[in-house]
Structures are given as structure tokens and as C-alpha cells.
Image: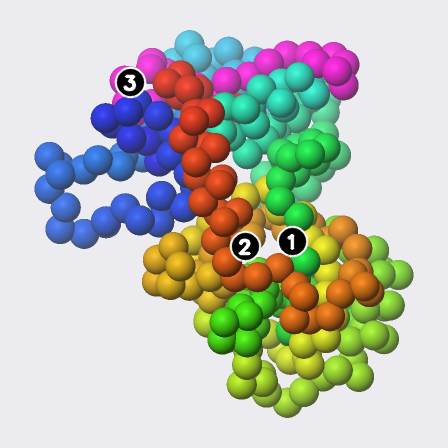
């Protein structure tokens, strides 16, 4: 995590990308990387992968020591009910973290499986909480071909906000998770007739490179956990700074048949969402720098 030495507080995720990496004098560093250890995979020549999480965590704390402003252990909570998990998730969001990683503590399902997705490890993000996170209405301006089971359809989509001042659409994120096969087939049938050879002149592409472009007509409601500055996307560029703004962990909610493309979330609204998030984060981050998993 990015860590402010003066305020002793965690900083937003995008601050990591602002850190200078070359020709920096130690005395000039104000944004330092703080490491939060949450698991132990290898110790003194021995693999820990087949040991239970409870034992791995105990060994981690036994063999490593906290170093002020540099190293600490990720905060954890052991629970057995969904209510306990819900309370801890709310606590993590309040303290400015993105959410939790829920893992099995003991039993055969608590070993570590590298490079594998498992139902024994669940990611809970703050946009799963009712009333938390920002909902935006965005225009579908491009798509990426699917792979594997998605070969016959689009597998991900490029979305954009609308800037009424320039009357341009500004790219903001790529979204490709959370869709069912039925939805992807439906979206392909609806969007394929809108395919065009190149991006229209009123689409501010930025660094996005979709496989196909669309006439900007379809609007989707999307929920996001966070907004961050991006060197790739063009949304609201020049309002906060030269870089655009992007959505982190965007999640499709529904099609907005009641909105035209020029009624989508505006670039200025995107900038307001970002500024509101930064303000709320600075108020809620406690001086206690434990992270939540």
C-alpha cells in the first residue's frame, strides 16, 4: 500500500502509480510503499502450501517482526457467521480499504493453491454493500472478442462517459466479468448490427484498443467500487489532471433502455465522483495502518 510518512495514513491505490521510481533521493520520499503480509508460502527452505491457513499465519507472525512505516501484518478477523463477515466488511470499507478476502482457516480446504481460483477463497468488495459504491450510466463504444466458451460472442466491452461540452464520448473502462452466457449472446445480437470499422471521430479513445467499435447508442448502468486515475482511458481528462479517470472492478447492473447515449453520465460527474471518493477517503482513513483481508 502507498503510505504517507507525515500523516501516518494509507493512501488511495492510484498513489502507487505516482511514485517516482528513478533518480529519487531517500530524503525526498514522501509516499512510501508499506508492506502488509497476509500469508506465508515458503519458510526456511520448506513449502508451506499444504499447511492450514491458521498454521501459516501463526508461523508468519512468529518469524517476522513489525517494522515501523515499512512492514506490518494484514488485519484479520476469525468468524463463523455471515453476520460477523458483514460487520468486518463494513469496518474495512469505513477505514478506506477495498474489502475482504474470505478464506477457510482450518480443514483440508485451507491450504494454498497457487494460480487457481477456488470457492474456498472469496473476494468481497465494498460495492457488494447496499448503498456503497457509485453507479454510472455508460455508453458501450467497443468490444473485445471472447475466448474459450465465449468464442462466438464478445467477451468484454469498452465503455465511455459523455462530455456535453465537446459532445464527445470518453473511454472509461473495460468490463468483462459477471456476465452469463445468455447475457453475452443477447448483447452480441443487439450490438453486432452497430459495429463500425473504426472509432467515430467523437469518441476520445485514449489508449484503449478494442477488437471492434460500435455506434454509441446502447447505455448500461454499471456499479464500481472505486475510481482511479488512468494513463489508458480518457474520461474527464483535464478536469482533475491530464490523465483520465477509470473504474476499478466495474460490475454490470442493467441495460438503460430509457436513456440515449447523450444522456449518459457526464465527464464532469465522473470527476465529481472521483473527488468525492478522495475526500471521503481522507476523512475515514484512520492512523491505524492495518489493512483488511
| Residue at 53% from the left image edge and 47% from the top image edge | 273
Classed neighbour count for the residue bearing mark 2: other residues with Cα under 10 Å, few (<14), some (14–19), many (≥20): some
Give the mark nearest the N terminus, 3 or 1.
3
Q: Earlier in the sequence, mark 1 or mark 2?
A: 1
Give the number of the disc on residue 22: none
Picture quarter with the C terminus: top right
8 lies above or below 137: above
Where does label 2 land, which residue?
269
Examine the structure image and report whether residue 83 is included in the region drawn in magenta: yes
Label 3 neighbour load within 10 Å: few <14, some 14-19, many 20+: few
Q: Where is residue 249 shown, x and y percent of the image?
A: 60, 48
Q: Quadrant of residue 121?
A: top right
Which residue shows up at 60% across the image and 28% down it?
A: 100
Which one is nearer the viewer's eye here, 224 or 134? 134
Helix, strand or loop status at disc 3: loop
* Residue that appears at 45% across and 45% down: 275
Give how far across and how far down residue 125 sits, in percent: 63, 35
Q: Earlier in the sequence, mark 3 or mark 2?
A: 3
Measured Cα–Cα span from mark 1 to mark 2 = 9 Å
* Image location (x, y in percent) of residue 162: 58, 68
Check if mark 1's residue and mark 2's residue have beta carbons within 8 Å. yes
Nearer the camera: disc 3 or disc 1: 1
In the rendered image, residue 96 lying in the magenta stretch gets the answer: no
Q: CA distance from mark 3 to mark 1?
A: 41 Å
- Rendered image: mark on residue 67: 3
Q: Is residue 104 above or below residue 62?
A: below
Find disc 1 in the rendering and name its residue: 136
Range covered by the magenta-colored residues: 64-84
- Could you give the CA–CA distance between mark 3 and mark 2, rounded to whole angstroms? 41 Å
- The furthest residue to the front: 165
Residue for point 53% across, 54% down: 270
Tell me the element at label 1.
strand
Amino acid at each position: 500500500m502507498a503510505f504517507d510518512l507525515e500523516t501516518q495514513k494509507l493512501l488511495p491505490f492510484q498513489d502507487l502509480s505516482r511514485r517516482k521510481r528513478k533518480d529519487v533521493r531517500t530524503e525526498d520520499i514522501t509516499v512510501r510503499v508499506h508492506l502488509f503480509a497476509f500469508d506465508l508460502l515458503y519458510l526456511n527452505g520448506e513449502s508451506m502450501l499444504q499447511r492450514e491457513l491458521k498454521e501459516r499465519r501463526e508461523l508468519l507472525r512468529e518469524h517476522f517482526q513489525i517494522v515501523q512505516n515499512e512492514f506490518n501484518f494484514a488485519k484479520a478477523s476469525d468468524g463463523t457467521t455471515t453476520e460477523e463477515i458483514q460487520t468486518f466488511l463494513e469496518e474495512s470499507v469505513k477505514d478506506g480499504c477495498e474489502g475482504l478476502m474470505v478464506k477457510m482457516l482450518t480443514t483440508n480446504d485451507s491450504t494454498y493453491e497457487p494460480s487457481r481460483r477456488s470457492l474456498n477463497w472469496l473476494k468481497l468488495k465494498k460495492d457488494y454493500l447496499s448503498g456503497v459504491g457509485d453507479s454510472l450510466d455508460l455508453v458501450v463504444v467497443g468490444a473485445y472478442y471472447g475466448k474459450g466458451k465465449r468464442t462466438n460472442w464478445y467477451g468484454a466491452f469498452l465503455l465511455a462517459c459523455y462530455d456535453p461540452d465537446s459532445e464527445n464520448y470518453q473511454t472509461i473502462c473495460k468490463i468483462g466479468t459477471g456476465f452469463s452466457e445468455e447475457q453475452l449472446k443477447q448483447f452480441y445480437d443487439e450490438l453486432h448490427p452497430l459495429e463500425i470499422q473504426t472509432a467515430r471521430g467523437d469518441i476520445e479513445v485514449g489508449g484503449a484498443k478494442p477488437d471492434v467499435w460500435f455506434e454509441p447508442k446502447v447505455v448500461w448502468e454499471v456499479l464500481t467500487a472505486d475510481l482511479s486515475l488512468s494513463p489508458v482511458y480518457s474520461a474527464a481528462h483535464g478536469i482533475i489532471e491530464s490523465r483520465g479517470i477509470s473504474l476499478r472492478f466495474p460490475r454490470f447492473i442493467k441495460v438503460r433502455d430509457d436513456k440515449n447515449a447523450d444522456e449518459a453520465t457526464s465527464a464532469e460527474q465522473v470527476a465529481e465522483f472521483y473527488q468525492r471518493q478522495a475526500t471521503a477517503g481522507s476523512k475515514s482513513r484512520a492512523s491505524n495502518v492495518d489493512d483488511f483481508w
